[in-house]
Image (cartoon, rainbow, N blue to C red):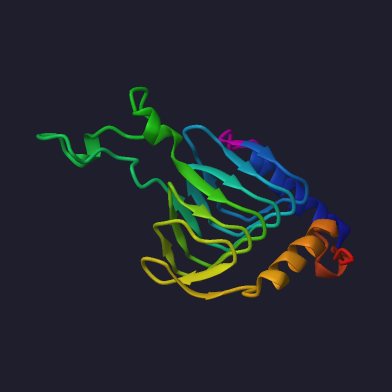
């Protein structure tokens, strides 16, 4: 068990190292097999995050603490390729990685706040902020901002429900979460540290 968990940890470190677009990572990160990362300006990943298998991030991204990103999720740029030049095939139009790409296009990205769950196969377009505590359903296509604690589904994604609807429950959840201690272990769930804070 210790050998397997050590190898999984090394595999994550290797995946971070081989993708120079990843500029910073927090403790407790897990990255699954087959992921690809590229960004014009960079990708940052918070503490205790899980990124599943075959995830593709091809835009700037800031991922908060405790994010759970399921397998085959994609973050993609909505303005990566110029399509408006007369007489030029789209394949040869300007793209986000070009030296002369507009700064506004280079700077665009995805922001995932803390404690967000993005389900299997969801697609998130650049320019989107997914609010704290939100859930994105499997297969959703997120084209606009998601409010904190909203649950969104569909294409384009729309709010279908909410977590912690009562503002007092939400505030209590955030207090307890903020005072808690949560640590991932590659050895498995039974080795995780799950210590919610005390609500006084």
Judging depth in this view, the residue of 161 and 67 nearest the camera is 161
For the N terminus, which image quadrant? Answer: bottom right
Rendered residue at 54%/68% (across/down): 150
First to last magenta residue range:
17-22
The verdict on residue 148 being magenta is no
Q: Position of residue 117 (x, y in %)?
A: 60, 64
Rendered residue at 81%/66% (across/down): 188
Rendered residue at 29%/40% (across/down): 81
Asked whether, in this view, residue 13 is left or right of residue 52, the answer is right
Q: Quadrant of residue 175?
A: bottom right
* Magenta stretch, overall SS: loop
The verdict on residue 19 being magenta is yes
For the C terminus, which image quadrant? Answer: bottom right
When the figure is inspected, residue 124 is found, relative to residue 23, above or below; the finding is: below
Asked whether, in this view, residue 168 is left or right of residue 182, the answer is left
Q: Quadrant of residue 3?
A: bottom right
Q: Quadrant of residue 194?
A: bottom right
């Amino acid at each position: 068990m210790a050998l397997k968990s050590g190898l999984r940890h090394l595999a994550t470190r290797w995946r971070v190292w081989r993708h120079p677009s990843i500029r910073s990572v927090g403790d407790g990160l897990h990255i699954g097999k087959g992921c690809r990362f590229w960004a014009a300006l960079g990708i940052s990943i918070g503490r205790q995050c899980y990124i599943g298998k075959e995830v593709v991030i091809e835009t700037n991204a800031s991922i908060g603490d405790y994010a759970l990103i399921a397998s085959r999720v994609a973050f993609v740029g909505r303005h990566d390729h110029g399509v408006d030049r007369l007489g030029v095939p789209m394949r040869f139009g300007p793209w986000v990685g070009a030296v002369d790409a507009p700064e506004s296009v280079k700077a665009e990205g995805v922001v995932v706040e803390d404690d967000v769950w993005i389900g299997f196969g969801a697609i998130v377009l650049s320019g989107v902020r997914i609010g704290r505590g939100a859930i994105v359903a499997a297969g959703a296509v997120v084209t606009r901002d998601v409010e904190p604690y909203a649950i969104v589904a569909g294409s384009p994604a729309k709010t279908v429900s909410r977590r912690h609807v009562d503002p007092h429950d939400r505030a209590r959840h955030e207090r307890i979460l903020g005072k808690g201690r949560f640590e991932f272990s590659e050895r498995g769930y039974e080795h995780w540290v799950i210590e919610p804070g005390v609500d006084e």
